[in-house]
């Protein structure tokens, strides 16, 4: 048993159900709530909040701050258990994971860039935040294929989103409005290779 | 009476004034633009605001924006809005804007819709450069916006073909017309409306 992950997600029956839900969704995706054990989540959140972040701003593309994911979280992501869990859910053989970490607050966003080559990809992201978020505050992550409603992952603390995108799927983080006050969202993303 | 005399503040119609406006437009930084305060005769502006608020506004939402917008006003059934649409599409108006901007404009070839930015609404940075748009225009029908209320039209300086930073920010002012030349440098945004006031405007492009 891995003490860093909610025991519910270490039960084979639960994992089988998650795998089924993931594969039936279009695009293939799932949002897992309360993924980390509370103590571990709070420890990582505290560490993230104490880590210096560097502003990245390109008006027609993005506004956020970049920081380094804590060592303990990177260790979890690269652990045998987590990688095998991702492999079971996505049915994708994993050779490596690229981890990045972004902090969003009022007036931050990312925009779709259609010039980027967007092939099929498998990725996941953890959400760390102190606040309860409503969609109208912004900050959610959306995956869009152009026409139709985008797939939206709401901002929920201690959630893990997993998605396998189809060709020409673009993601963005919705601009955070002043209703969010001083609340922040820290997104730790892993791109599976 | 020409449509210009009927609608526009006569101050803007004197030939020496046009030359002054042309000079201001062409010299503006970071790209050619101009703002004309008290642009319409005030009674026309007041009546237009009342008429517009009866139109249907639909919520528009994407990665780039969040605001409310009407359909193209060419389809409005309101008499005054129809007349205003005709005025914007008239040869006289196209010639008036051409004389300031030195852009050859095709009267009748225009897009016109109304937008409403409620609290939290915004439009992020983009250049408007699509097809044959030559001039983008915004006519404000909102009152009492101060800088701290947000909702400002922001113009970005450019570096290496990309927007760099806000160089000019214009608060929306009652009965003012702002227009700018559309190009691959015309990076602009509408700052989030931080207030509870409604930012009502008519805008679009001349071709």
Image (cartoon, coloured by chain):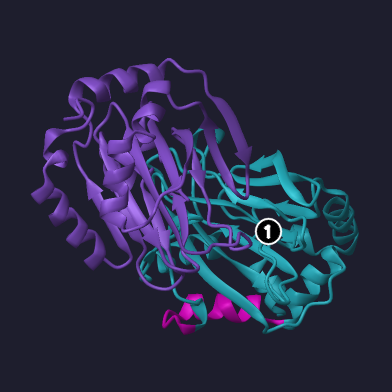
Chain colours: A purple, B cyan
Pointer 1 local density, CA inside 10 Å: few below 14, some 14–19, many at least 20: some
* B79 falls in the magenta region: yes
Residue A173 is situated, as x and y percent measured from the top left of the image, at 44, 47
Q: For the stretch drawn in magenta, what is the main secondary structure? A: helix
Q: Nearer the viewer, residue A90 or B165?
A: A90
Please state if A47 lies on the left or on the right of B94 as rendered: left
Q: Is residue B195 above or below residue B47?
A: above
Q: Nearer the viewer, residue A113 or B119?
A: A113
Residue A89 is situated, as x and y percent measured from the top left of the image, at 26, 54
Element carrying mark 1? loop
Q: Residue at x 51, y 18 (%)?
A: A52
Q: Residue at x 45, y 27 (%)?
A: A69
In this figure, which residue is indicated by the disc labeled 1? B127
Residue B134 is situated, as x and y percent measured from the top left of the image, at 75, 70
Figure quadrant of the N terminus of chain A = top left
Q: Is residue A7 above or below residue A85?
A: above
Please state if B61 lies on the left or on the right of A29 as rendered: right
Please state if B97 lies on the left or on the right of A19 as rendered: right
* A151 falls in the magenta region: no
Residue A103 visible to the viewer: yes
Residue B83 is situated, as x and y percent measured from the top left of the image, at 55, 80
| Image quadrant assignment for residue A138 | top left
Q: Residue at x 85, y 61 (%)?
A: B18
Q: Nearer the viewer, residue B151 or B182?
A: B182
| Image quadrant assignment for residue A178 | top left
Residue A183 visible to the viewer: no
Query: What residue occupies the far top of the structure in this picture?
Result: A50
Please state if A70 lies on the left or on the right of A28 as rendered: right
Q: Is residue A33 above or below residue A39?
A: below
Q: Nearer the viewer, residue A176 or B190?
A: A176
The part of the chain drawn in magenta is B75-90
């Amino acid at each position: 048993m891995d003490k860093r992950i909610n025991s519910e997600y270490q039960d084979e029956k639960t994992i089988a159900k998650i795998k089924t839900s993931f594969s039936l969704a279009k695009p293939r995706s799932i949002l897992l709530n309360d993924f980390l054990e509370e103590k571990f989540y709070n420890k990582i959140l505290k560490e993230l909040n104490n880590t210096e972040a560097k502003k990245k701003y390109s008006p027609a593309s993005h506004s956020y701050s970049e920081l380094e994911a804590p060592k303990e979280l990177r260790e979890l992501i690269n652990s045998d258990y987590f990688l095998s869990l991702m492999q079971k859910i996505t049915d994708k053989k994993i050779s490596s994971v690229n981890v990045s970490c972004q902090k969003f607050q009022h007036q931050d966003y990312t925009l779709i860039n259609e010039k980027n080559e967007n092939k099929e990809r498998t990725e996941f992201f953890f959400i760390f935040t102190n606040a309860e978020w409503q969609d109208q505050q912004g900050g959610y992550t959306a995956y869009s294929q152009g026409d139709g409603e985008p797939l939206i992952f709401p901002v929920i603390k201690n959630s893990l989103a997993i998605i396998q995108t189809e060709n020409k799927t673009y993601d963005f983080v919705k601009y955070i409005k002043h209703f969010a006050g001083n609340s922040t969202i820290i997104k730790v993303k892993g791109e599976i290779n | 009476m020409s449509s210009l005399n009927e609608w526009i503040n006569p101050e803007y119609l004197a030939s020496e004034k046009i030359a002054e406006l042309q000079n201001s437009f062409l010299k503006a930084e970071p790209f050619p633009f101009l703002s004309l305060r008290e642009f319409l005769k005030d009674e026309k502006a007041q009546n237009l605001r009342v008429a517009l608020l009866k139109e249907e506004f639909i919520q528009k939402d994407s990665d780039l924006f969040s605001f409310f917008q009407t359909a193209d006003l060419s389809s409005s059934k309101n008499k005054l809005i129809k007349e205003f649409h005709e005025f914007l599409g008239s040869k006289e108006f196209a010639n008036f804007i051409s004389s300031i901007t030195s852009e050859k404009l095709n009267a009748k070839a225009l897009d016109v819709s109304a937008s409403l930015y409620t609290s939290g609404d915004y439009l992020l940075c983009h250049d408007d450069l699509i097809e044959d748009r030559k001039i983008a225009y915004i006519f404000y029908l909102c009152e009492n916006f101060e800088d701290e209320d947000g909702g400002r039209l922001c113009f970005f300086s450019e570096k290496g073909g990309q927007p760099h930073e806000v160089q000019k920010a214009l608060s929306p002012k009652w009965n003012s017309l702002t227009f700018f030349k559309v190009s691959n440098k015309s990076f602009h945004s509408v700052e989030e409306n931080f207030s509870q006031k409604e930012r009502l405007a008519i805008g679009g492009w001349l071709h």
